[in-house]
Structures are given as structure tokens and as C-alpha cells.
Amino acid sequence: MRRHVSRTADALLSWSQLEPWRRAGLTLFLLDGLAVILVMSFASTYVPLYALAMGATAFEVGLLSSAHSLGVIGGSALSGRLVAALGDPKRVTLYFGRVWHALSYLLLLAIPFFCTDTVAVRVLIVVYALRTLIGETGVPAWAAFVPTLVPIQIRGRFMSLRSVFKMIALMAIMPLAGAVITGLGGYPFGYQVCFAAMAVLGLAATGFFRRIPDPTPAPEPAVIHEAPVRREAWWRGPFGGFVCGLTVWTLGTALAAPFYVVFMTRNLGLDARAIGLLTALNTAAQLVGFLVLGPQVDRRGNRGTLVVSVALLSLLPLGWLLVRHWTHILPLYVLSGLASAGMNLSSLNLLLELSPEDARAGYAGAYYSLLAAATTIAPLVGSWLFAQGGFRGVVIAGGSGGLVGVAVLAALLIAVPRRTPAGRMMS
């Protein structure tokens, strides 16, 4: 499998000019992505169903979601301190983002053996919060690790290819997991078998990630300044503008996100099967977006891609005002998939480019914490807006808030010099 993945990546990326250690590391990184995306996504998809099977109320399922959000915020904030303590972002990612995520499935699996009914649900909420808190400390550390392995010349293409592999794996495995759970009788045995399988996959991801060679050349050069720059200056400069713009944009666009399903169900009469097919269309559009936009990001830079992508995603809520039939949703889902691919690629690359190299994990942690806080707060505000002005009011507010974030990003990023593939800066 490793040889096949390596040949496929070489054909798409033409990486034969890279050092042998780096090609080996990039292949292992692709395999790691295939395994770890299943481990991370399985919990968010099936743990709420696990809770419902235990007898959780709607309020307790809401608590589970809140526990996850708080865990993301706390774990992201702790990541920089852990990297400073252990001295290596790869080690933090390995221990917390790989080993812990795998072993935590055994804790989830064990709950029905020791607890039942209400007690089991409460223990699940605590375990899930702890799992998220510890596991999320590996995400900013992972972001700090990426530039040491993936050269800037192929970063857009490589990360898009990694995302495509991950999404194909998800599309194949997640429905199969649901069928296994149902076929084995649901709760608890069906879930426990799948949790055990996810633990094994997580340990496989750990093995792939651990074997990635440490870089032999010097790390990617940092941005050169004429004088030493205080930490606060990074927040007053391009990095602060980038984070501020995306936080405002997230607050705006996330206002309406929970209510699209409500509109499709109540106003258009769509059932779960139809909504699932629309989601599959969105996923397919993302796959196309990753394949098309990866090379564009490498050639033309990240700023334009990010601004155009978030502008499109900001206009899409307003597009829902024109929906009168389910067929009108199709172009919205296609554009959303394409734009989401561009936004994900360019935002990660800009995070790596604009954050200081010697403290990247801490800055990435602050970035992820602020976005997680925005996605936690926005639905609460959106619920109030929906109660006051209905679906029309919340999508107008969502689109308007998103466009304000786009304006902030465009104003603060267009004038910033762009780093060349060699690591220098250019106008």
C-alpha cells in the first residue's frame, strides 16, 4: 500500500527532485492522513448516536456538543505550552493527536461494562470532553510540524492530495461503519466493535506518523526583519489581521449554518435521504476543488484564493433567499464545496506563513481556539435571530457578517508581501 501511494503521489506531484528522506516522510504522512481522519471523524459522527442509544435526552446531547466545543478551545490553547515543554511539535502530535485519540476509544468502549442509563450518559460526556481536550492539543502542534516536512513549493498540491485521499476514505468507510453497527445489533455491541476498530486504526496512524523521518536540512527560513520583533507585534501585524478577519467571518457565516437543515425539512419537505444525497454532492465538489485549486495555490499564492473563497461562502447564505425548490439548492452545495476546499487550503498555508516559526504551535493554538469560540457562540446568537426574524433574518445576518470578515481580510492581507517558494519575500 505504501508503494502504491508513493507512486500515485509522485505522478501527481512530480516530487522526484526532493530528498529521499522527504519523499519517504511525505508518503508516510499521506498514510497517516488516511488513518487519522477516520479516527477523528468517527467520534463526531457516531458518539452522539451512542449517547442516544444509552438513553440520553436532547439536552444531554447538547451538553455533549458543548463539551466537545470547550475541549477544542482548551486543547488548542494548551498546545503551545506543551510544545514548549516537550521541545518538539512532532512529539506533541504523536502523543496527544495520535496515541491518545486511539486509546481513548477504549474508554468509550468500556462505559457500558461499568455504567448504565443516566450514569452512563454522564460518564460519556465527561470522557468525551476529556478526549477532546487532550486530543486537540495535538492539532496546533501538527500545524507547526507541517512546514518542517512539506516544502512550500508543493505544499498546496500535497495538502490538497492528502485531503482528497482522506475524503475518499471517509466516503467509503463511514457508511460501512454504520452498516456494521446496525448489523451487530446497535448498542452496545455494534458500537463497541467499531470503537475497537477505530482504536486499531488510530494505532496504525501512530505507527505511520512516528516513522516520518526527522528533517535533515535546516528548517524553512523565517521571515527576515530588519530589527527584532516583539511578540505583540505579530498580533498587530498580518497574523493578527488574518485571525481577526477569519474570526469575524466565522461568527457571521456560522449564524445561519444550523438552520439550513431546518429550512430544507420544514419548507421544502426533504427527508434524511435527500439531505444525505445533497451532502454527498457537497463532498464531491470539495474533492474537485482540492484537485483543481491545489496547483493554483502553489502558483498564485494563498491570499487571493482565501479572499475569493470566503467571499463566495459569505454570499451563499444570501443565495438561500432565492430557494423555492430543492433543485435551487444544487448550485449552492456545489459552490460551497468548491469554495470550502479553497478556504481550507489557503487558510492553513497562510497560518503557517504568517505565524512566527519559533512559536508557531502557540499561535496556531490561539487561532484554533478563537475559531472554535466563534463556532460555539454563533449558533446561540443565530437561534435568537431565528426566533426574532425567522430563516430570512438569520441568513441575511449571516451573509452580512461574513462579508464584513471578507472586508477585514482583504484590507489587511492584500498589502502584505508574499513569501516565495525559496522562503524569501516578494512584493
Image (cartoon, helix red, strand yellow):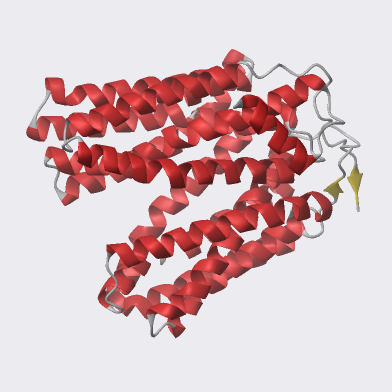
**Within the image, what quadrant is residue 224 found in?**
top right
* Picture coordinates of residue 92, whole percent (x, y): 55, 20
Compared to residue 413, the image places residue 404 above or below, namely below
Q: Is residue 87 above or below residue 414?
A: above
Can residue 233 be seen from the camera position used here?
Answer: no
Q: Nearer the viewer, residue 281 or 246?
A: 281
Q: Is residue 170 above or below residue 105?
A: below
Above/below status of 161 relative to 387: above
- Image coordinates of residue 306 in percent, x first then y, are 68, 58
In front here: 285 or 248?
285
Tell which of 30 and 93 is nearer to you: 30
| Relative to 30, 197 lies left or right | left
Q: Residue at x 48, y 63 (%)?
A: 281
Which quarter of the figure is the N terminus placed in?
Answer: top right
Can residue 365 be spotted in the picture? yes
Q: Position of residue 265 (x, y in %)?
A: 28, 71
Question: Residue 8 falls in which quadrant of the image?
Answer: top right
In the rendered image, the residue lying farthest to the left is 117
Residue located 44% across and 39% down the image:
73
Nearer-the-camera pick, 1 or 281: 1
Tell me where residue 195 appears, x and y as whole percent: 31, 28
